Image (cartoon, rainbow, N blue to C red):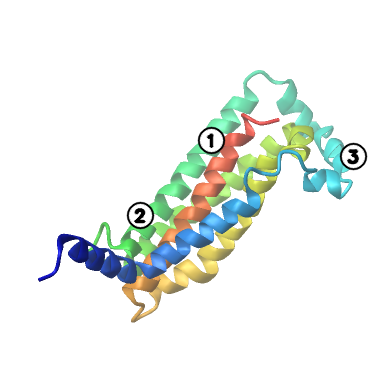
């Protein structure tokens, strides 16, 4: 007769095997964070290392950056719209990834969920970029010496590339295994969480 410990070990083993792809994605996200975090606070930023500080300063001295920097209300208004774009984009990502994880909308095919959320993804992305550029121009010097900023930009590039080339293709592909879909979804959520977390941390770091 199996002991309770043996039964628990068997259940844990089955769970690990059944979720091996998702666990593998967790490891990949952990490796990404290990590479980027704690954002090398004692090291030079890419802007410093590449000698781009003067270029960043010149961009900030332009009319857009000066106008926003000298205004009392422009920056917070643009920031609110920027966060709205992030919420729209994040919502579309979460809905699709939860479907790939098998958590919600189980009666709808992943391809159908993606078709309904993809327009909102691009709306959110356009809003984020359209508002993010002027926000950056108003704080170029801060961004140049801010590790959180370079983490956000790196993670954003990786997240967009991954979403368009891997996640979306797996969502519409026929016969994709549950294991693969779970792994794809977890990695997607990890990348976009990194984007959001690094973006919020810009305001709390130098």
> Which residue does the image show at 40% across and 64% down from the upper left?
22
Q: Is residue 201 visible?
A: yes
Picture mark count: 3
Q: Is residue 187 visible?
A: no
Disc assigned to residue 95: 2
Single out the mark in the foreground, 1 or 2.
Answer: 2
Position above or below: 76 against 89: above
Residue at numbered disc 1 = 81
Single out the mark in the foreground, 1 or 3.
Answer: 3
Q: Secondary structure at mark 2?
A: helix
> Which residue does the image show at 67% across and 35% down from the upper left?
135
Q: Position of residue 164 (x, y in %)?
A: 53, 66
Q: In this orientation, which residue lies closer to the viewer: 71 or 21?
A: 21
Q: Secondary structure at mark 1?
A: helix
Position above or below: 28 against 78: below
Q: Position of residue 126 (x, y in %)?
A: 57, 50
Marks 1/3: CA distance? 29 Å
Q: Position of residue 196 (x, y in %)?
A: 53, 43
Position above or below: 199 against 95: above
> Which residue does the image show at 54% across and 41% down from the upper left?
197
Disc assigned to residue 54: 3
For label 3, count other residues whose C-alpha is less than 10 Å away and answer few (under 14), some (14-19) or many (20+).
some
> Which residue does the image show at 39% across and 78% down from the upper left?
173
| Mark 1 vs 2, N-terminal side | 1
Q: In this orientation, which residue lies closer to the viewer: 90 or 115?
A: 90
């Amino acid at each position: 007769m199996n002991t309770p410990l043996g039964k628990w070990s068997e259940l844990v083993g089955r769970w690990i095997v059944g979720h091996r792809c998702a666990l593998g994605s967790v490891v990949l996200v952990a490796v990404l964070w290990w590479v980027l975090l704690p954002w090398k606070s004692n090291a030079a930023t890419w802007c410093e290392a590449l000698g781009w500080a003067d270029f960043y300063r010149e961009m900030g001295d332009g009319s857009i950056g000066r106008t926003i920097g000298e205004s009392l209300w422009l920056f917070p208004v643009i920031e609110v719209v920027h966060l709205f774009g992030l919420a729209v984009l994040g919502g579309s990502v979460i809905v699709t990834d939860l479907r790939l994880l098998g958590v919600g909308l189980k009666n709808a095919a992943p391809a159908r969920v993606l078709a309904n959320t993809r327009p909102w993804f691009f709306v959110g992305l356009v809003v984020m970029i359209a508002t993010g550029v002027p926000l950056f121009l108003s704080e170029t010097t801060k961004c140049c010496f801010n590790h959180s900023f370079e983490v956000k930009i790196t993670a954003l590039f990786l997240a967009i590339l991954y979403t368009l080339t891997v996640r979306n293709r797996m969502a519409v592909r026929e016969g994709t295994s549950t294991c693969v879909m779970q792994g794809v979804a977890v990695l997607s959520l990890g990348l976009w969480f990194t984007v959001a977390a690094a973006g919020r941390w810009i305001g709390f770091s130098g």
